Image (tube, rainbow, N blue to C red):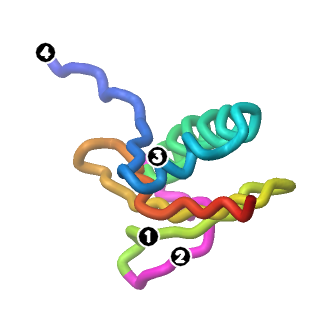
Amino acid sequence: MNEPRRGWTVWTEETPASVLLDMPEVLSGKVVNYLVALALEVGSAFDEGSPLPGQPLDDLGERYSLVLEDEPVLFEYTLHPQTREIRIPVLVWFG
């Protein structure tokens, strides 16, 4: 019997995680919620063969950049289809 495919998740590296901890609680909560929703959006787009959200940063389609609308936050994510996750290696808060 085939197991159902699991959903997509987000994983944040140590430096971006420390940036999140330095943010005001309201902003950090907003960023975390956005990243969780982004993992689902990226996963759905990947599964459907649609373009992924953000600005591509490489020719392989593995690294993207986004700015959080109306907030002083930008970040990069990388795509890891084998583990069905996106990873956040860079997160910048202009606070």
Q: Report the residue marked by disc 3.
A: 17
Main secondary-structure element of the magenta-colored stretch: loop
Q: Position of residue 47 (x, y in %)?
A: 43, 47
Sequence order check: which comes first, mark 3 or mark 4? 4
**Would you say 46 lies left or right of 94 here?**
left
Q: Amino acid at mark 4?
A: Met
Q: Mark 1 or mark 4, which has the lower sequence index?
A: 4
Marked residue nearer the N-terminal end (3 or 1): 3
User: Which span of residues is magenta-colored?
Assistant: 47-59
Distance Cα–Cα, label 4 vs label 2 = 37 Å
> Which residue is under mark 1?
63
Q: Residue at x 36, y 50 (%)?
A: 14
Q: Position of residue 19 (x, y in %)?
A: 54, 51
Could you tell me if the residues under marks 1 and 2 are in contact, i.e. CB atoms within 8 Å? yes
The one nearer the camera, 89 or 55, is 89
Give the structural element (helix, strand or loop) at label 4.
loop
Q: Residue at label 2?
A: 56
Vertical position of residue 1 compared to residue 39: above or below: above
Looking at the picture, which amino acid does disc 2 mark? Pro
Please tell me whether mark 2 sits on a helix, a strand or a loop: strand
Q: Nearer the viewer, mark 3 or mark 2?
A: 3
